[in-house]
C-alpha cells in the first residue's frame, strides 16, 4: 500500500501525540552498500526529512529523534567530527523549510563536550522557529537518559539550597519539570530501526509507559509508509498504564 492508502486506514482520533525514534542503522546501511559510514549518516538525514513530513501530514504533535548520544563520543574522531558537523549543517540547511512548514525545533541534551559557539549557533537557529506550533521537533544531541535524570536531580538540589524549593522531598513532578524535555508530553510511541531491541539510554524517564515498535529496516531505508504502519499498530494496542 502507498502512503495515502495507509493514511486512509488511520483513525485521526487515535494519533500518538508524541513519537520518539532511535534512528539506528546508518553505518550498517553504508557497509551493505560498500560505502563509508559517513555516507550512511548523510543518507539518514534524508530519512529524517521524510519522517518529519509524514508526522505533519498524519497529525503527530511531537517528534523526538535520537541524533547523537553521550556514548557516541567513543567512536572514531573522524566519525564524531563528521556527525557533529552534519547535525549543525543539516539544521542550517533545513531551518527555512522547517519554519515554512510550521515546525518548531529545539535541541535537547547536555552541552558538555560541545563548544559554546556550537551551542549558541544551534540555539540561535532554532529560536527562529519557536513561534511555530504545527509540529514540535526535538533533536536529542549529546543526549543520555541517565545523565538527564542526574542533571535534573542536581538542578533540584541546587534550587533547594538556594531556597527556591522549600520541601526536602524530591517528587516525580519535580524531576519531570527539570528534565531537558520539560514541557513535552511523554512519548506514546517509541520506534527503533535496524533490528536492535533496546532503548540505549534514550528517554529513560519519559518512556515508562511508551508503546515500543521495532523494525529490522535500517534507518536510511525507513519510509513514510513504514512509519504509518507503526502508527497503525499503535492504534490497535490496549494501553492500560498499569490498570486493568
Image (cartoon, grey):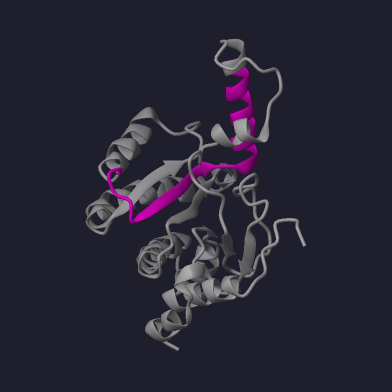
The question of residue 84 being in magenta is answered with no
Taking the spot 55% from the left edge, 68% from the top edge, the residue there is 28
Which quadrant holds the C terminus? bottom right
The question of residue 135 being in magenta is answered with yes
Whether residue 195 sits left or right of residue 5 in the image: it is right
Residue 12 lies, in percent from the top left, at 45, 71
Whether residue 187 sits left or right of residue 138 in the image: it is right
Figure check: 98 above or below 30 = above
Which of 32/191 is in front? 191
Q: Which residues are magenta?
A: 130-158
Figure check: 231 above or below 207 = below
- Asked which quadrant contains residue 114, the reply is top left
Which quadrant holds the N terminus? bottom left
Residue 242 lies, in percent from the top left, at 75, 56
- Asked which quadrant contains residue 39, the reply is bottom left
Residue 119 visible in rendering: yes
Residue 54 lies, in percent from the top left, at 39, 69
Which of 191/156 is in front? 156
Figure check: 150 above or below 91 = above
Whether residue 179 sits left or right of residue 127 in the image: it is right
Residue 156 lies, in percent from the top left, at 60, 23
Residue 33 visible in rendering: no
Amino acid at each position: 500500500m502507498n502512503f495515502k492508502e495507509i493514511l486512509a486506514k488511520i483513525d485521526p482520533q487515535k494519533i500518538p501525540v508524541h513519537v520518539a525514534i532511535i534512528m539506528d542503522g546508518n553505518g550498517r546501511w553504508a557497509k551493505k552498500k560498500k560505502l563509508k559510514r559517513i555516507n550512511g549518516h548523510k543518507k539518514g538525514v534524508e530519512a529524517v526529512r521524510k519522517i518529519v513530513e509524514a508526522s505533519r501530514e498524519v497529525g503527530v504533535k511531537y517528534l523526538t529523534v535520537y541524533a547523537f548520544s553521550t556514548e557516541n563520543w567513543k567512536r572514531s574522531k573522524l566519525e564524531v567530527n563528521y556527525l557533529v558537523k552534519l547535525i549543525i549543517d543539516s539544521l542550517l540547511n533545513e531551518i527555512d523549510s522547517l519554519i515554512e512548514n510550521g515546525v518548531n525545533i529545539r535541541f535537547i541534551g547536555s552541552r558538555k563536550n560541545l563548544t559554546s559557539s556550537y551551542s549558541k549557533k544551534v540555539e540561535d537557529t532554532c529560536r527562529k522557529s519557536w513561534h511555530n506550533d504545527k509540529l514540535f521537533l526535538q533533536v536529542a544531541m549529546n543526549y543520555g537518559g541517565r545523565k538527564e535524570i542526574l542533571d535534573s536531580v542536581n538542578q533540584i538540589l541546587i534550587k533547594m539550597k538556594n531556597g527556591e524549593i522549600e520541601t526536602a522531598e524530591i517528587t516525580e513532578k519535580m524531576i519531570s519539570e527539570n528534565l531537558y524535555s520539560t514541557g513535552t508530553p511523554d512519548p506514546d510511541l517509541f520506534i527503533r530501526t535496524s533490528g536492535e531491541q533496546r532503548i540505549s539510554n534514550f528517554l529513560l524517564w519519559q518512556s515508562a509507559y511508551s508503546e515500543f515498535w521495532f523494525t529490522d529496516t535500517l534507518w536510511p531505508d525507513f519510509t513514510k509508509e513504514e512509519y504509518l504502519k507503526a502508527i497503525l499498530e499503535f492504534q490497535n494496542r490496549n494501553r492500560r498504564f498499569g490498570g486493568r
